[in-house]
Image (tube, rainbow, N blue to C red):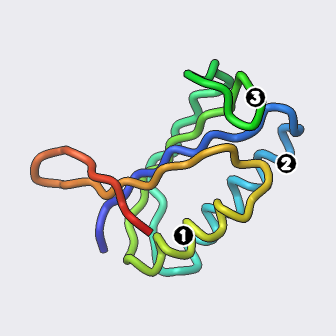
Amino acid sequence: MRPYETMIVFDTTVDAQAIQASLDRALDTIRAHDGTVGTLDRWGKRALAYEIKKRKEGYYVVVEFAGSPSTVDELHRILTLSDEVLRFKILRRDERAGRTSPVSA
């Protein structure tokens, strides 16, 4: 299993329960596809660098996890379909150098 990291930016106009439900769905997807969830870091509400879908703020969450490429593919699919997600990025972590690189899906 390879180490990955994803940053998810949620829409702040939806309620906190919808954000939590979407995050739980993403974490359950990782676990259901033989992945393991590591640290979960909630950054909270922050200003966006530029407007996304006419929004100026987003709720940021960073998740570290380990999984296979099929885990990443399914997570990518789930996050793309989620209406609460404004933007996300999945990176594969290089354990030796401590660097990350983008995952193309």
Tell me the residue that label 3 is attached to: 55
Relative image position of residue 62 (x, y in whole percent): 51, 42
Local secondary structure at mark 2: helix
Residue type indicated by callout 3: Arg
Local secondary structure at mark 1: helix
As measured in the structure, the alpha-carbon distance from the residue carrying label 2 to the one carrying label 1 is 19 Å
In the picture, the quarter occupied by the N terminus is bottom left
Instruction: Check disc 3: other Cα within 10 Å, few if <14, some if 14-19, many if 20+.
Output: some
Residue type indicated by callout 1: Ile
Relative image position of residue 43 (x, y in whole percent): 57, 28
Mark 3 or 2: in front is 3
Seen at 56% across and 75% down, the residue is 74
Q: Is residue 17 above or below residue 1?
A: above
Which badge, 3 or 2, comes first in the chain's sequence? 2
Tell me the residue that label 2 is attached to: 18
Relative image position of residue 72 (x, y in whole percent): 46, 70
Seen at 39% across and 64% down, the residue is 104
| Quadrant assignment, res 86 | top right
As measured in the structure, the alpha-carbon distance from the residue carrying label 3 to the one carrying label 1 is 28 Å
Total marks drawn? 3
Seen at 70% across and 58% down, the residue is 24
Tell me the residue that label 1 is attached to: 30
Left/right placement of residue 55 relative to residue 46 reads right
